Amino acid sequence: MILQGKSRVPVREVVLHCAAIPTGYFDGQRPFQVFATINRWHTERGFTNGFGYHGLFMPDGQFYEGRPFTMIGAHVIGHNSGTLGFLLIESRKITQIGDFDDWFTRQQELSLKARLRVLPGIETVSGHNDYAPKLCPGFKVQTQDWL
Ligand SMILES: [Zn+2]
């Protein structure tokens, strides 16, 4: 079980996000560059600890770590404590093949599922749109599709 923050809140849920940027914006960038850009955006928005997610998944499935899992994130108002926030970086390839139903690549799906399998204590996978009137992550997230 992952425990977060000074009060050691058990982490039982992962919340998925998209970057809400034009599709393909990060094409050709290395994971570190994507991290650095979003870290700057979050710092400019006044997030005390910068990058608000616990990690991001590149379109090719590469994972890049963000906040330590034991640190409370800044990704979903009212539900940051006891959750991990993961960001799925949009790919231009998705729109090139004309498949608008998919908001993530097959590689991202496999990579995320593999990571969820080794995270202790996760019972629920949700989307930002379950907690806020937002499109993010662009689709309806259902636990049984991911765990
Ligand atoms: Zn979001």
Image (cartoon, grey):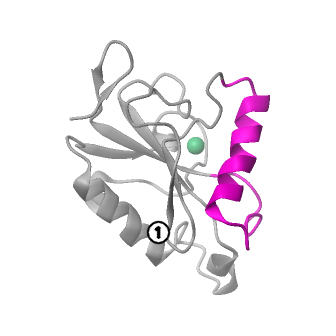
**Left or right: residue 64 compared with residue 35:** left
Give the secondary structure at mark 1.
helix
Ligand 1 shows up in which quadrant of the image? top right
Direction from residue 29 to residue 114 in the image, left or right: left
Magenta span: 19-47
* Picture residue at 67% right of the left edge, 66% below the top: 30
Q: Which quadrant of the rendered structure holds the C terminus?
A: bottom left
Q: Is residue 12 above or below residue 142?
A: above
Q: In the picture shown, does residue 104 fall above or below 125? A: below
The front one of 63 and 144 is 63
Query: How far across and how far down the image is residue 57, in percent?
Result: 52, 60
Residue at the spot 32% in from the left edge and 39% down from the top edge? 13
Residue ID for mark 1:
108
Residue type, label 1? Gln
Name the residue at 65% across, 57% down. 32
Q: Residue at x 48, y 33 (%)?
A: 131
